Image (cartoon, helix red, strand yellow):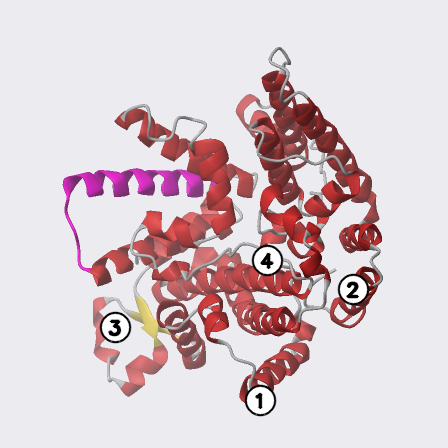
Amino acid sequence: MLFNSYPFLFMFLPLTLIVYFLLNRFNYYNASRLWLAVASLFFYSYWDVHYLPLMMGSIVFNFLIGSSLTKTSEKPNAPRKGILIFGIIANVSLLIYYKYADFFITNINNATGSEIALLKLVLPLGISFFTFTQIAYLVDAFRNQVKEYNFVNYVLFVTFFPHLIAGPILHHKEMMPQFADKENKRFNYTNVAAGVFIFVLGLFKKVVIADSFAPIATQGFNGAASLGFIESWVTSLSYTLQLYFDFSGYSDMAIGIALLFNVVLPINFDSPYKALSIQDFWRRWHMTLSRFLRDYIYIPLGGNRKGVFRTYFNLAATFIIGGIWHGAGWTFIVWGVMHGVGQVIHRLWGKLGLKMPKFVAWFITFNFINITWVFFRAENMTQAFHVLKGMFGLHGMDLPSFFATRLNLGSLKSYGVEFVAVSPLKLLGIAAFLLVCFALKNTNELRAEMKPRWVTAIMLAALFVYSLLNFNQISEFLYFNF
């Protein structure tokens, strides 16, 4: 079930809210949590009920492992570390089987000439997110930072539908106290106003902005072999904008919906395209994933505590793992390697004590991000290199044809410059929304300044109705694939 769908907006969400707060109104607190857990499971199984047993099996397994870690917390001779390792290996093995089995088989076939049949498994929706969420829970239980003895509470923690499919990645200790707080069981008009505000902005980002750039990016990547200079940049920038407005729009909607239930989810985006370094970018982009990679991979590997070389190795390894987590393909591995190398170069530059003008720092950072997104989007390495060759002029130089007529640049043809038909509106749209990313306030900043006024209500109503009118071009959220 999509957030941007009529069944969700006009049936599932209102019914879930009404029943939840009615049960709380009559002090049926356990029943209200059970209702929300069941509703979340329905939300998940609405896509394909066949994968519901898989997720429930994962939940039961991790609840038992977590309970074992909690019960043995004060037993000095208990094999707690072994229990934790077993739990992590089981979770990672499940992820590898469904997400990477065919990738490994394909590479074995290519390397050895064998013909092992592909498994052709359908990736269970949200498996990367609910697996990482539960790995974090097991590690926190091992560290004696969380305790959960109630199975319904644990199911709700993992499946709470706003974050279930594509994050944010949550911690038990930041979620369950909110469900236990009796003040949060009352209908809160202030939270509802803020939640609706955030949700509508996220809906507009996804349905109107991201889905408008999606066909441009898709057309460009599908025809990558024939892209010239300007078309390659249109393609890459369109995907850069599509990905940002798609995923940040989803995160906004998730945060807004959770607020309707008086639950505060962590912020996942903070104007990442304003970043002045690659390190700054990862402090702003998919912030809960960055937190997970730091706390559960980089620091356990040794962080920066074991010397300079080990620090650089840990940085690179963390981002390669992050790339692999996103998808089964060499393009994701290359994307992770590039970000790992970028982090190392940033650290080395910092040690030199040199500073560059902010504009130069931003320009380098944004173009690095834009170039690496090409690998993130491409279906294979060949397609990625076709787009990059076009961006660097290796497929020939070209300019929009309207430049030739309006600026009298026809003489450039003698220097090998071609003029291609590119819609001025397309270029204007890319420029306008890049400006939105670079210069305007983000959703979090707008929410902090939001005051319930008629003007605000009318604006939200207009954005909501316009978004509804664009439901005919629905596409799935990009991060559903990861």
Q: Label 4: how many residues lie within 10 Å, few (<14), some (14-19) or many (20+)?
A: some
Residue 325 point in image, percent of width and height: 54, 39
Q: Is residue 143 left or right of residue 306?
A: right
User: Which of pointers 1 and 3 indicates the residue nearer the eye?
Assistant: 1
The residue tagged 2 is: 21
Residues 77 and 219: in front is 77
* Disc nearest the viewer among 3 and 4: 4
Instruction: Tell me the residue at 63%/63% (across/down).
Output: 259
Q: Which residue is mark 3?
A: 413
Task: Give percent across and percent down for residue 395.
Answer: 34, 57
Res 264 label: 4
The stretch drawn in magenta includes residue 354: yes
Specify which label sits upstream in the sequence, 3 or 4. Answer: 4
Q: Is residue 28 left or right of residue 395?
A: right
| SS at circle 4 | loop
SS at mark 2 in the image: helix
Read off the magenta span: 332-357
Q: Which mark is first along the chain, 4 or 2? A: 2
Q: Residues under labels 4 and 1: Cα distance?
A: 25 Å
Measured in 3D between alpha carbons, the distance from the residue under mark 1 to the one under mark 2, in whole angstroms, is 27 Å
